[in-house]
Image (tube, helix red, strand yellow):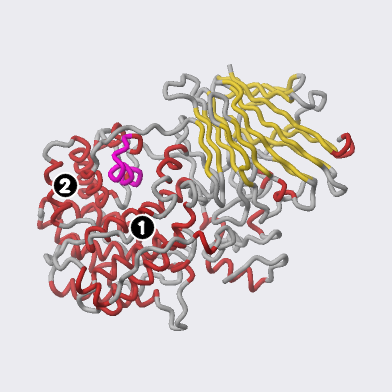
């Protein structure tokens, strides 16, 4: 297991790059792993696996329910119409080729999973022989690849799930030669590469991030598909998956926050729910997966990360904006709870032709969309916080808030999976404008192809030279113009709800060796403002304290602060504690590095407080952001 050292050698950096965050278990404690039920053996497999196909997500019961709901449910009808339109588009595309981008075949594997989801469901429901023929051609194309790129095992996992679904959802209708060749490919190109010749488990099998969910899910699907011809391999692979999955599920503990951010929640959790669905359909149980602490609560986290502007609260390596289509992963939680707050009915009812290219798991999702029965609308709170490896707090306006108030603040540390040096950072929206922004993520391949070490997490690692990753590109505090302490975990130590909610973040570990203590308090002091209050105790090492906020708004400096304007709206920044200090501006467009994400109009507003001006070693910085 790889652990961070104060100094990282070139060899260690190479190892870190190879495992891609898989081995950072620093956030987890041993007693936070909640095992799944794991009776899997050859005997259990033979006795309990459904004998007939389909049995992955689809089985006679789920398909019967789906066909019944297709007769009357407008959401299911509309989504199926969109799937059929997507299937028509797939039929017009050339067959897939083994094209590796950088070190990834992932885009090809994902496209295959998408195609099988579209074509497979249409064949399942309509029994269209032209669609069946195209599925056969798609399968033959990918099983002819020399390999499925096992050096980047996500590629293998998604391809394996795609081929397994193709075999299962066609339920023996493909030519016998295709079935045999596909099962052989699932063994030789899918499952066997997951068992290294060294005898050790691959890092992802017991890792604590999305790789665990995706790769174990793909191997479960592949194992079910080959269970009859190699029950020993299938049973031991499923057993390993059930043993390893709790390590990724532990990341949801205690409150459902996904530390890697909202779009990675969508990725990892979508594979968790499809894995649950196929286990239930094949074995009649999910082995306790959905009752793992924090997992069901993560639906609330997902909803709360959707800001009124259409942007995510995009902390960590998260994308910027959500799609216009309904959230199929969130809909699974709706199907299990009956909570209408998790079922985006209006988005599912948008014109099918306007939905465009659907999610690559949208075909499978039709099953749980058909299982949804509203049992009440449990309101998502307007003030919420969650603890864990990357704790956050969210304040929202009421349901009909005309100001569209939205605030997100966070703790955390750089060493969390896909994490940034953004402890204490915040975003703020008002009147449809995101005033304080998170710079978000940037494409991995464009960085990696230059030789950039994106994945190292040591204090001096290259990752932290990027604005999207370091504290200089986030709305937080910086001391001595230095980087945050990479493994200094900022925690939410106090939270109060109500009409004027507030939360306090202990940032002292973030600045270890730079000052004695630091706490940041967020207060929603009115329906159109947020107060940020920092309590600082300096040390002999403290030279400079910088309060900063990242924005794309135009800025006009005024006495005691600044006026921000954007999209015809205004926001006032008031330096309540140090009105004699002028707010300054640092242009970040163009960004400092050529490899940085270039965001038009990006700038950093700063309030710089020299330590020598701090009386008795203690000071409070109070800044208020307020709209009209």
Residue 437 sits in quarter: top right
Q: Residue 243, position in %: x, y?
A: 40, 68
Q: Residue 524, position in %: x, y?
A: 59, 26
Which residue is painted at 75% across and 36% down in the image?
535
Disc 2, SS: helix
Q: Is residue 280 visible?
A: yes
Residue count near mark 1 (Cα–Cα under 10 Å), binned few <14, some 14–19, many ≥20 = many
Does residue 519 appear to the left or right of 213 in the view shown?
A: right
Name the main secondary structure of what is drawn in magenta.
Answer: helix
- Which disc is residue 66 wearing? 2
Instruction: Find out whether residue 573 is within the magenta segment.
Output: no
Pointer 1: what residue? Answer: 289
Q: Is residue 280 above or below residue 551?
A: below
Does residue 265 appear to the left or right of 58 in the view shown?
A: right
The span picked out in magenta is 329-340
Q: Quadrant of the N terminus?
A: bottom right
The one of 490 and 348 positioned closer to us in this rendering: 490
């Amino acid at each position: 297991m790889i652990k961070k050292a104060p100094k990282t050698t070139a060899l260690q950096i190479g190892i870190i790059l190879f495992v891609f965050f898989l081995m950072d278990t620093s956030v987890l404690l041993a007693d936070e792993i909640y095992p799944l039920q794991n009776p899997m053996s050859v005997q259990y497999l033979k006795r309990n696996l459904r004998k007939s196909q389909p049995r992955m997500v689809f089985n006679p019961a789920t398909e019967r329910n789906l066909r019944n709901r297709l007769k009357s449910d407008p959401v299911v009808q509309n989504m199926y119409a969109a799937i059929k339109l997507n299937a028509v588009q797939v039929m017009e595309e050339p067959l897939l080729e083994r094209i590796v981008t950088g070190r990834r075949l992932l885009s090809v594997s994902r496209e295959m999973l998408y195609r099988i989801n579209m074509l497979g469901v249409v064949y399942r429901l309509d029994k269209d022989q032209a669609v069946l023929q195209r599925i056969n051609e798609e399968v033959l194309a990918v099983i002819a690849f020399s390999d499925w790129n096992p050096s980047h095992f996500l590629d293998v996992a998604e391809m394996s799930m795609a081929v397994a679904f193709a075999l299962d959802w066609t339920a023996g209708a493909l030519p016998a030669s295709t079935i045999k060749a596909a099962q052989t490919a699932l063994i030789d190109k899918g499952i066997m590469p997951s068992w290294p010749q060294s005898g050790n488990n691959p890092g992802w099998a017991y890792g604590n991030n999305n790789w665990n969910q995706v790769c174990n899910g793909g191997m479960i699907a592949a194992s079910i598909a080959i269970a009859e011809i190699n029950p020993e391999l299938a049973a031991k692979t499923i057993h390993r998956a059930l043993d390893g999955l709790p390590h990724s599920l532990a990341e949801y503990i205690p409150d459902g926050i996904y530390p890697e951010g909202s779009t990675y929640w969508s990725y990892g959790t979508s594979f968790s729910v499809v894995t649950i669905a196929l286990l239930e359909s094949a074995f009649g149980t999910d082995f306790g997966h959905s009752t793992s602490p924090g997992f069901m609560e993560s639906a609330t986290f997902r909803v709360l990360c959707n800001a009124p502007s259409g942007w995510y609260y995009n902390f960590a390596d998260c994308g910027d904006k959500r799609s216009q289509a309904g959230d199929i992963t969130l809909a699974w939680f709706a199907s299990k709870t009956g909570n209408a707050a998790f079922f985006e009915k209006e988005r599912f009812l948008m014109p099918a032709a306007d939905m465009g290219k659907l999610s690559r798991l949208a075909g499978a999702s039709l099953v749980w969309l058909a299982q949804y029965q509203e049992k009440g609308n449990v309101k998502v709170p307007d003030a919420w916080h969650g603890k864990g490896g990357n704790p956050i707090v969210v304040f929202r306006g009421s349901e009909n808030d005309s100001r569209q108030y939205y605030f997100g603040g966070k703790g955390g540390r750089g060493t969390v999976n896909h994490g940034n040096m953004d402890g204490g950072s915040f975003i703020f929206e008002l009147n449809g404008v995101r005033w304080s922004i998170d710079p978000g993520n940037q494409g991995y391949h464009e960085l990696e192809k230059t030789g950039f070490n994106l994945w190292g997490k040591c204090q001096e690692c290259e990752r932290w030279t990027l604005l999207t990753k370091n504290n200089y590109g986030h709305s937080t505090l910086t001391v001595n113009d230095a980087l945050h302490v990479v493994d200094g975990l900022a925690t939410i130590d106090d939270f109060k709800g109500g009409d004027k909610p507030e939360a306090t973040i202990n940032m002292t570990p973030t600045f270890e060796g730079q000052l004695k203590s630091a706490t940041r308090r967020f207060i929603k002091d009115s329906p159109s403002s947020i107060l940020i209050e920092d309590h600082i105790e300096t040390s002999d090492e403290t030279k400079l304290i910088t309060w900063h906020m990242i924005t794309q708004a135009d800025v006009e400096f005024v006495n005691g602060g600044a006026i921000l304007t954007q999209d015809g709206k205004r926001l006032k920044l008031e330096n309540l504690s140090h009105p004699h200090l002028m707010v300054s501006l640092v242009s970040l467009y163009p960004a400092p590095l050529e490899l940085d994400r270039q965001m038009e109009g990006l700038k950093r507003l700063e309030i710089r407080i020299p330590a020598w001006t701090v009386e008795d070693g203690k000071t409070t910085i109070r800044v208020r952001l307020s709209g009209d």
